[in-house]
Image: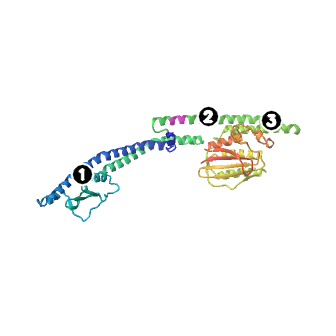
Amino acid sequence: MFFRWLKHYMPRSLYGRAALILILPVVLLQVVVSFVLVSRHFEGVTEQMTFATSREVMLVLEAMEVSDTYPDALPTVLETLDISVSHPEALATEDTRLWYDFSGIIMTRDFKKLLPGVQAVELVDDSKVVLNMAAASGPLVVEFDRKRVSASNSHQLFVNMLVFGALLTFVAYLYLRNQLRPIKRLAVAAEAFGRGHSLPYSPRGAIEVRAAGNAFLDMRARIERQIEQRTLMLSGVSHDLRTPLTRFKLGLSLLEDEDREPLEKDVEEMQRMLDAFLDFARGVYADESEDTDPTALVENLVNSYTRSGADVTLNEPAGAGEIPLRPASVRRAVDNLIGNAIRYGTRAEVSVEITEKYVRIRVEDDGPGIAPERYEEALKPFARLEPGRNQNKGMGVGLGLSIAADVARAHGGILRLGESTKLGGLRADLVLGR
């Protein structure tokens, strides 16, 4: 349970996790070393130096007691030990120290333990120590240099640890970024190829990354060859099938009107089905990506339907700009969505929304719609939902929504189906990633 909870707060990217693996041990090592050093080394050194200084203060007190017999004893001891004494009217009763002075805690504790007359220890700065003592001769203030009771420049070790730790972490960060860069380039190339773009890529980095890069290049080459072979095959099939259909049309033109019209409808239906099959088999990689204005593309389609007498309107677009698209594929997908809306309804509304992350083309109709539980089935190739759609408006081959979904996936997006709250029919959102 703890690891599941911790998982939500861990970095999700490989780069972030590698950086955490690198930095966390360094920080923990510095914390442990600093704690051990402070608790053992500096504390022990401070205790020893405080003990020695306490002995010197006791020597000053003894010299003051015999000052009447030996007048030169006290000045000699004070000059030799570099300690100054004074007799104030009142002594301080509270210990003072700087908030970051951790060694001052040890000094204050030891001075009070070793010198019973100490009432307060004043550590007002890092240069002097002031002892407020109650001596036999009255209130006494003893002042001496701070260096005598604590290690000098003790902070330098911590500064060196922080500076060199940060420097080595930065060097490791640069090396880590250099090692992860080939993985990111491979991910970008794979994602671009999934969207139909073939970016230049050459394997680099460690042996394992190079192996993965070479495998990706081999896979991409095989897929491109397969697409090329399929395109050539479809071109041949299209040519071979259109020729007999043309002969059928010519032969039917010689028949009487009464016998010709039903047969011509069958031939037109065959022609339409053949075009739909070829569009689906051709896929979305037949055209190259180029900067395209989605609003202008949709507006041209809507105008074409309007000129043919269809009730199709384009709402005010939200956003503007050109983005990299496969215009022929997107046009085919939007054409299929508008065609379905007109076929199964009486009117359709189209809207375009362009943001920094995606482009959404929405087509709504007032037809019977599709039941929510059949949305997934409707996106499958050759799926016909006759019970939920009006066949009197025309009958498709079940590829319109499937082609639109393939176009959306090729552009890093998705085709979403739902109920139109405005017209009451089907709402189809063609979302294209940027």
| Amino acid of disc 2 | Gln
When the figure is inspected, residue 399 is found, relative to residue 349, above or below; the finding is above
Mark 1 neighbour density, 10 Å: few (under 14) some (14–19) many (20 or more): some
State the image coordinates of residue 298 (x, y, percent, origin top left): 69, 50
Residue at 27% x, 62% y is 91
Mark 2 neighbour density, 10 Å: few (under 14) some (14–19) many (20 or more): few
Residue at 62% x, 54% y is 321
Q: Nearer the viewer, residue 224 or 104?
A: 104
The CA span between labels 2 and 3 is 33 Å
Magenta-highlighted residues? 212-218
Which residue in the structure is indicated by mark 3? 248
Q: Secondary structure at mark 1?
A: helix
Earlier in the chain: of badge 3 and badge 1, it is 1
Which residue in the structure is indicated by mark 2? 226
- The dot on residue 114 is 1
Q: Magenta stretch containing residue 215, yes or no? A: yes
